[in-house]
Amino acid sequence: MTTFDWSILRSALVTDATEVVDILVASVLIYGVLRLLRTPANRMPLLGAVILVGIYFVARVFGLFLTEMLLRTAGLALFVVFAIAFQEDIRRAILRWRHWRPFQALNRSRHPSDDVEPLVDLAFQSAEQRIGVLIVLQGHETLEHCVNGGIELLAPIKTSLMQSIFDPHSPGHDGAIVIRDGQIVRICAQLPLSENIDDGKWRGTRHSAGLGLSERTDALILIVSEERGIVSLAQNGRLVEIASAADLTLRLGSFLAEHCPATHRPRLAKRLFQHSGLKVASLAIAALGWFLFARQGDTIEQTFVVPIEYRNIPTNLCLEDRPPAEARLTLSGPDPAFALLSPSSLRVRVELGGYDSGAVDAHLTEQDCVHPPDLSVYRIEPSVLHFRLIPCRTRPGEKVAALIAVEDPTSGAE
């Protein structure tokens, strides 16, 4: 009776688990990038990085050697440049993660819907009286890196209290009220102005400040124009005019229900199912990328005819006659690695700096071959090059080239 080899099963399970973890980690990173791309303030640096990565892969696939070499060489320098140029965006991202509270339960004495009515009443009463209003409803992300100044306090959300704060005769009526977890936590706050100077949908400093904060955080900002008497909401870098109290009630209720749940249930369980479409898309992109670029599959071998370069020949020596100009290079590796391989980038380099005149037997190894790191050298034919170095006869004033590169023949797979 034959026994089952459990080591094969364990190896297969470990391999499958590694691939699943690889896809999940990649999907989380992709999801983070897609979420950041939804914020206008982060789009330019991220799009720039995505474009550079795309150019690198295009250069690798189509054999743009100079472009690929420049991107590889300048990779660290570009990383430092991005870190310096976008240090503010990096600081914001770190602060967001540092203040993220996935397991913290909220202890609210009021239901989120109880906060909607005072806000709606304030908004449309102020619009009718042409009184400016700027109210920030904090979401999941911290506002510490964006909101400056003001007076910290803890006060209930009441229409009369907010009307007194925004009264034109009040010293702090031009500032913003910040609401978090069903309470007013700051008044007279200063918000960052929008960087989108071409957007003609908003007018005035309040709209610019509300839109600017929405570009940097997930907060919802309620704005009332004292010039036009129009109620607006700013969220995710967009400004929307609200025509009716019913519409404002619906939008505020939806935001508060998502960001300020009334139950004591941990937030993590709810957040796992938020933005489900974006998460599914991230998982699909990661799975597709793994299938196209990372799936190992069977190990295959391919043979290429590659040029031989003779480098660093001593200045007083020359190669006698015509040395071997080509070699047959057999590479081994997964099929996706060969799909990205450009055969014309392959070559064999023979370093002659340590040789004296006479017969030379150069033994070729993998270190002498230029090839992608995800492929290994299986065979080199010939494995030994036989040639002679002889003293050069030069006229006065002439120099002998220190590098002889045999003209590249057309490389191809066999």
Image: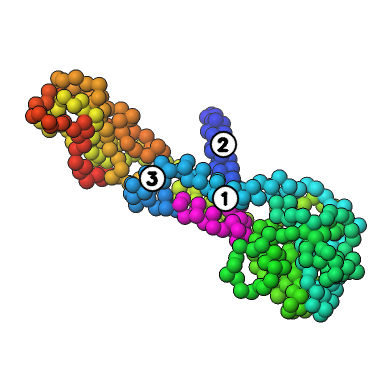
Q: Which amino acid does the dot numbered 2 rest on? A: Val
| Residue 399 as seen in the image, left or right of residue 52 | left
Graded by Cα atoms within 10 Å as few (under 14), some (14 to 19) or many (20 or more), the crowding at tag 2 reads few
Label pair 1/2, CB-CB below 8 angstroms? no
Pointer 1 with pointer 3, Cβ within 8 A: no
Q: Which mark is residue 14?
A: 2
Q: Residue 318: tell me if it is visible.
A: yes
Magenta stretch: dominant SS? helix
Return the residue nearer the eye: 50 or 176.
Answer: 176
Q: Nearer the viewer, residue 361 or 33?
A: 33
Residue occupying the point 23% across, 35% down: 309
Instruction: Tell me the residue that label 1 is attached to.
Output: 86
* Extent of the magenta region: 32-53
Q: Is residue 83 one of those drawn in magenta?
A: no
Nearer the observer, disc 1 or disc 3? 1
Instruction: Tell me where residue 144 appears, x and y as whole percent.
Output: 73, 51
